[in-house]
Image (spheres, rainbow, N blue to C red):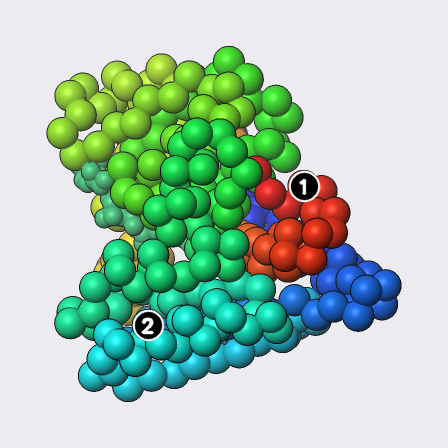
Amino acid sequence: MSAEIIDGKAFAATVREKVATHVARLKEEAGIVPGLAVVLVGEDPASQVYVRSKGKQTVEVGMNSYEHKLAADTSEADLLALITQLNNDPAVHGILVQLPLPGHLNEDLVINSIDPAKDVDGFHISNVGLLGTGQKSMVPCTPLGCLMMLRDHLGSLSGLNAVVIGRSNIVGKPMANLLLGDSCTVTIAHSRTRDLADVVRRADIVVAAVGRAEMVPGDWIGPGATVIDVGINRIDKPGGGTRLVGDVDFASASAVAGAITPVPGGVGPMTIACLLANTLTACCRANGLEEPEGLTA
Ligand code: NAD
């Protein structure tokens, strides 16, 4: 069997288009422009690339982008003061603090100081609790993107066996909660899981979010399973240079799976698209307007 490729790049483009259409309507009918504030502390090169990309895509869908670049030695008090200012700014509907923060800053404290209604990353403890209890929340972008692709590909997920490999707060745990919300039977596997191969083999849906290059081989995948590969790992190429691979061994897994996301071009592009979707959702909620369909969990 040769798996269908789930094209995250193309899907992300349709999500951005949907967001842009809704943003244009908001502007025309209500005179409202959604705004996303991104806060970057320090000069981590990867974070700088992400922040630039987020800002560019925000503007491309017609929203306002506010970038706040702070020095690496910014004090916690100054960062918290900026967040308070953004919390109180009616033009800002979404606030994202780019992680990781420099070591002297308490990430939990900083994230939990964001107004939960503007927490477009979905990391605030209130949003984690709301998601965990099946209530309306802001949903973390990467798992939201995975859920959208799964629904698009499979339709109803009800009753399916889903295995999430990885239990991080950013991907694994919210992913498991979202799958549970769609009535999957969910197993969360992690570094201490016994007989991981057997656990994965029983899954109709496999979401790999580990951060280990190609650790899931094709013979762990049940025939016809849907595989969502969240991992982004840079490895050396035999002739020199590097390339990106996922947590799943694409060559062997795509021979067995029913469908699979590639790396790059799968989950990655969906993450920023979902950030834009979350900003739009936050703006609609803030203004008591109807939320766009198909852009939230
Ligand atoms: P993390 O390091 O916080 O968590 C990794 C998880 O994997 C842990 O819960 C750990 O228990 C589990 N794990 C480690 N070794 C294992 C093993 N041998 N067997 C089973 N489980 C094991 O990582 P994260 O932040 O959840 O990210 C995971 C991967 O997803 C990384 O490659 C990261 O770059 C990628 N990622 C991609 C996006 C995207 O937009 N595509 C977003 C976030 C993360």
Residue 64 seen from this side: yes
Identify the amino acid type marked 2.
Answer: Leu
Front-lying residue, 177 or 6 = 177
Q: Earlier in the sequence, mark 1 or mark 2?
A: 2
- The image shows residue 62 at horizontal and vertical percentages of 70, 71
The secondary structure type at the circle numbered 2 is helix
**Mark 1, other Cα within 10 Å: few <14 / some 14–19 / many ≥20:** few
**Mark 2, other Cα within 10 Å: few <14 / some 14–19 / many ≥20:** some
Foreground tag (1 vs 2)? 2
Image height of 143 relative to 283, above or below: above
- The picture quadrant for ligand 1 comes to top left
Quadrant hosting residue 44: bottom left
Quadrant hosting residue 198: top left
The secondary structure type at the circle numbered 1 is loop
Q: Is residue 137 left or right of residue 281?
A: left
- Residue indicated by mark 1: 294
- Residue indicated by mark 2: 80
Query: Is there CB contact under 8 Å for labels 1 and 2?
Result: no
Quarter of the picture holding the C terminus = top right
Q: Is mark 2 within 8 Å of ligand 1?
A: no
- The image shows residue 135 at horizontal and vertical percentages of 51, 33
For the point 51% across and 70% down, which residue is it? 88
Residue 230 seen from this side: no
For the point 41% across and 71% down, which residue is it? 84
- The image shows residue 276 at horizontal and vertical percentages of 58, 60
Image height of 59 relative to 225, above or below: below
- The image shows residue 187 at horizontal and vertical percentages of 33, 22
Identify the amino acid type marked 1.
Answer: Gly
Image height of 290 relative to 269, above or below: above
For the point 36% across and 25% down, which residue is it? 163
